Amino acid sequence: MEMIEQLFVMLKQAALALPQALLPAELYARYEGMLSLVIGISAILVFAPATMLFLTWMERKVVARMQKRYGPNRVGKFGALQPFADGIKMFMKEDIIPKAVDPLLHSLAPMVILIPAVMIFAVMPFGKDMILVDLNIAILFIMSISSIETIAILMAGWSSRNAYSLISSLRAAAQVISYEIPLGFSMVAVLMMAGSMSTLDIVLAQQGGWFVLTPWGFLGFLIFFLSGAAEVNRTPFDVPEAESELVAGFHTEYSGMKFGLFYMAEFLGAFAIAAFSITFFFGGWLDPFEPLLGFAILPSWLWFMLKTYVLVFVFFWFRGTLPRLRVDLLLNFAWKYLLPMALLNIPIAALWFYLPAGPIRWVAGWAIGGSLIFGMHQLLTYHRVKKLYGRYERPSRPVVTESVPLKS
Amino acid sequence: MQRVNQLHPVAEDFEPAFYKDLHTDLMFLNMGPSHPASHGTLRTFVALDGETIMAAVLEIGYLHRGFEKTAEHRTYDQVIPYTDRLNYVSALMNNVGFAKAVEGLLGVTVPDRCIFLRVIISELMRIVDHLVCQGANLVDIGALTNFWYLFNQREKLYDILDKLTGARLTNSFTRIGGLARDAYEGFEDDVLNVLKDFEAAVLDVTRLVKKNRIFQNRTVGIGVISAEDAISYGFTGPCLRASGVPYDLRAVHPYYYYDQFDFEIPVGENGDVYDRFMVRFEEIHQSIRIIRQALKMLPGGPVNSDDKRVSLPPKDQTYVHIEGLINHFKHIYEGVKVPAGEFYDATEAANGELGFYIVSDDSGKPYRVRCRPPCFTIFSAFPDMVEGGLIADAISTLGSINIIAGELER
């Protein structure tokens, strides 16, 4: 078990053994940190595209099942080679740069969107001892890196000189700026309780119990997950690329691998949101049964992947179920609902912090926190419920009447 | 800008000075003729303030095929395949509508079995038309899954039509004075089976969307048209009924024994997208009721009129007797001779009143055929319905009025 647990760490040690043998000890000691970083970065650069390939296949299969169809099933067993076929297609396609576009921005945008999507993996704790850099400002890092995506979308939309792309990029900017705020506030509670911004410390702080089990963690998770879905343009928040309205949104004018990079960034973003939800609220790579059984059932990195893919599946589930929001409703949801809820979450976390540990904290915390959350929810939706129910109070079927001839 | 100003008085209210101060201007956007949500080739030229549609101008004609002119050079039976291409989603209803108009002009009565079969296939096509409209509209709103729930059932019906008519989409099944052929053995059971699937599919979809908050936000109060406006624009069909006017040709001017069937006319309240959705879902249920009754009442006997003017002689006559051979030859080469006159007849098609106005000059070919497509009048109200809304509203409205470009532009 220990061996599987430390598999990737050992692989890294093995990779380091070669320069250790070749280089003089003094030189090696000087560059060891850098070498191990290079190995870690290469691992992530392999992992990220592989994840993306798997996610495209998984999304198509999962959504197909929900929609009573087969999904890809021709290339390879269960269509497993379909992503590779798609990738080859992407590479082989002609890269068209329309005459009217701003060529520099147009070419730069796909890179600007992909690089932060991969960079964010740097602070992701994949397993025990499996984190590239344990930044002590990881939360700030995540916030700052993920917001670069907006700039790339604006670049793509503006440089395309296409009305649909422009509308889409403005939608994306409005959306990401709005959802960034609840996203940030939902992480504040985690940061308060863990006492650290480091993702590793946050995971270790959940050894006593996952944060999602607490009232502030539960609310925080919902806010984080929904805002995250909006941040990476997943359904039902995919207004920037609403294909029935805006053709393909900001990447209408892209073709070939540049289009593929946008696609890749979106999938990596979805994976990252799921992974950080796991890290912040579901105990990261911690084995939930280890405290009970005293031994680990699965290696930590497998736990991390399992939990992440459950949340990724929820993203796909959304896509198979929900219609798309309209852009004004989307912004209303962020400002009028998620933000007040996220602000409420902070005092609830503070209350939890000052309650004495033990069963009383769970009972009192959930009683007070839960009722506060419920009250706030009622308060925020009361107006809407009152306004809408007047309008929605209609027969489940339209009135069926005996037809009468019209007066001529 | 000039164009919108000329074409649309709404453009007067744009307060140009205000936009000048802000250094902003309206943005003009061509939605269509090639756009994912333009069902067919429709062009809507919109003036946008942000995402709000300030003015919309329609342009049609991208799918104009000259149906009416072509019909003047074809015999009446040869026109029927052209009617398939009007509303290609429910081709059989157009066949029935045209055949009924010509038969009215001729004064031919068709056998009861033919009438009941025509009712059954018409109602089946009405269901399919509504399934396609709802499925496509839900896709436009973003609820992709419903599309497959609805379209899978449509495929099953197309298998039946394949067996019945030999074609899946463009069936050309009716003839003047009857049908191309009688129903095959086991047709009734096949239809009853597929009706169950339709009910299940509609139930699946209504459960998925009806109480969905996002769906309601996207449809309630969107694309509203009042009953008065709908009447003055010349709305017919589900869109008119969604506005609260219980006008249905099947009930108001019953034809084909529709007064004998027990069914109801669903009527909406507000005339918004939600009501149009619900009216269509309810109409599917009502059509299923009609088909079940019609299948029970389906009489035996021939499907073609025994009137020698319109029907081909039986094969033994054609091959053995010279009279039969000449009759067959004249029928095929010169067409059904229709006495001189003018005639308008309409049926309740899936989108509304589908009328054919036929002028005959006592020859085998129509002198003039005018088709009254239900979409045409409905689409003319589209700018009124979308102005002041957002782009997303325009898309869901366009889906809900079910524009079929083939029918719109003929």
Image: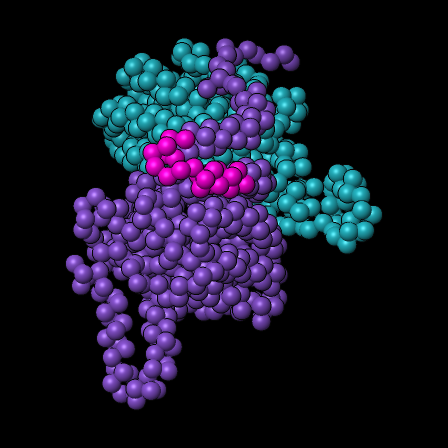
Chain colours: A purple, B cyan
A200 in relation to B202, above or below: below
Q: Decide which of A50, A336 is in the foreground and name it.
A: A336
At x 49%, y 31%, the residue is A372
Q: Position of residue A257 (x, y in %)?
A: 43, 66
> Is A13 included in the stretch rendered in magenta?
no
At x 18%, y 45%, the residue is A293
Q: Decide which of B217, A311 is in the foreground and name it.
A: A311
B180 in relation to A347, above or below: above
> Is A359 included in the stretch rendered in magenta?
yes
Which stretch is magenta?
Answer: A343-364
At x 61%, y 55%, the residue is A166
Q: Position of residue A165 (x, y in %)?
A: 57, 56
The chief SS type of the magenta part is helix
Which residue is farthest front?
A356
Viewer can see residue A8: yes
A291 in relation to B263, above or below: below
Is A19 left, or right, of A94 in this rendering? left
At x 42%, y 42%, the residue is A217
Viewer can see residue B40: no
Q: Position of residue A351 (x, y in %)?
A: 47, 38
Quadrant in which residue B151 is drawn = top left
Q: Position of residue A312 (x, y in %)?
A: 35, 49
